[in-house]
Image: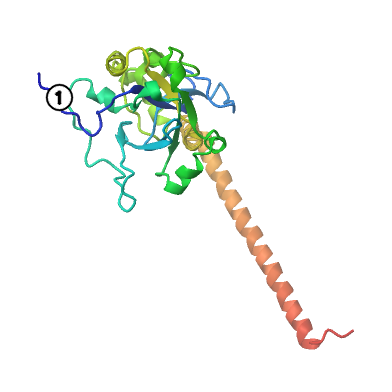
Amino acid sequence: MQVPKKCEFCDKRGLPLLLVRDAVAPSGSGVPAAKGPSIALPSTTAYYTKRLLRSGYVNVYDEARRRWDCYFVTPEALFYKLSLTSILSPLLTPTGPFYCTIDGHREAAGCITISDPRNATSVWIGFSDTLWTEKVRKANEDREVRRRHMVEVDVRSVMAGKSGPHDPIRKVDAVVAEYSLPSPRIKPLIDASPFRYCACFGGGEKLVKEFEGIQAGRGLIVTVPDPAGIVQELAFLMTHLLESFLVKNPTDQRNLAASAGIDQIKSSIIGRAETEEIEAARMAASKMEAINPLGKR
């Protein structure tokens, strides 16, 4: 039987991991709630959930083999493994969009794998907006450095049947926002987030099946720290809530516009007065210097 050709996205072997991030969801959006970071959100406004990674770079450090693997995360939350052998011209992005039509390969492209997991110990995973340089990777070979912003996966424990702090892949529909809601119900989350939403509702069963085919009973959902993403979502949500409030309350919108106009006029008057006072003081100092250049009393 002819084996289907693997593409640059979906050639995955080893321990499969679905990487997600802590994200901010508006209250009432309906996506699954998650524990999230230690900074609490007002329950009437927002809560934490798990979402697929936004576009950026994933850096993976294998402790046992002292080796780095790096991936580019596409806007569709697919993982393209990068070559770090060429220092002068590394391939930072895929040569083209995801095109593989083989059944199950879309799901494989949405995960990373830890090769030869039976001989691995701990693997550390970090996310960044830009590709780490060799110097940054070298610094993160120090355990105390990488534990600040990377998540540890104890591969030995996982292969022994212990998931640790991570969720098993079979819970994907109940944990990850993109897999939890059908398209008609995701609008509140899409409107309140600056990042692309890759709808995967109904695909959980196929994802689990693909993970089982790669490594039976061991696939995990791993949350990778992304504080910059949370900050961007909070800022976007605040603007979104303000705009929604003003649309529903046109009188307040006019009042706020008038108040902003008054504040602008006030700031202009104060600024002009300060400038005039400073200029007057300079002129007075110049006159005194002309009358008494040596400063004698």
Is the residue 174 above or below the residue 72 in the image? Answer: above
Q: Position of residue 20 (x, y in %)?
A: 41, 26
Residue at 31% over, 21% down: 200
Q: Nearer the viewer, residue 50 or 255?
A: 50
* SS label for mark 1: loop
Q: Using the rendered image of the protein, determine whether residue 58 is visible from the camera's viewpoint.
A: no
Q: Nearer the viewer, residue 185 or 284?
A: 185
Position of residue 230 in the picture relative to residue 217 (left or right): right
Q: Nearer the viewer, residue 251 or 146?
A: 146
Residue placed under numbered mark 1 in the picture? 4
Residue at 59% over, 54% down: 265
Is the residue 280 above or below the residue 171 in the image? Answer: below
Residue located farthest toward the left when viewing the structure as drawn: 1
Residue at 51% over, 43% down: 139
Residue at 40% over, 37% down: 68
Is the residue 275 above or below the residue 288 in the image? Answer: above
Q: Position of residue 138 (x, y in %)?
A: 47, 44
* Way the structure is coloured: rainbow
Q: Position of residue 243 (x, y in %)?
A: 47, 35
Q: Position of residue 236 (x, y in %)?
A: 47, 36
Count of numbered badges drawn on the protein? 1
Q: Badge 1, how many Cα within 10 Å: few under 14, some, many 20+?
A: few
Residue 84, quarter of the rendered image: top left
Quarter occupied by the N terminus: top left
Q: Using the rendered image of the protein, determine whether residue 156 is visible from the camera's viewpoint.
A: yes
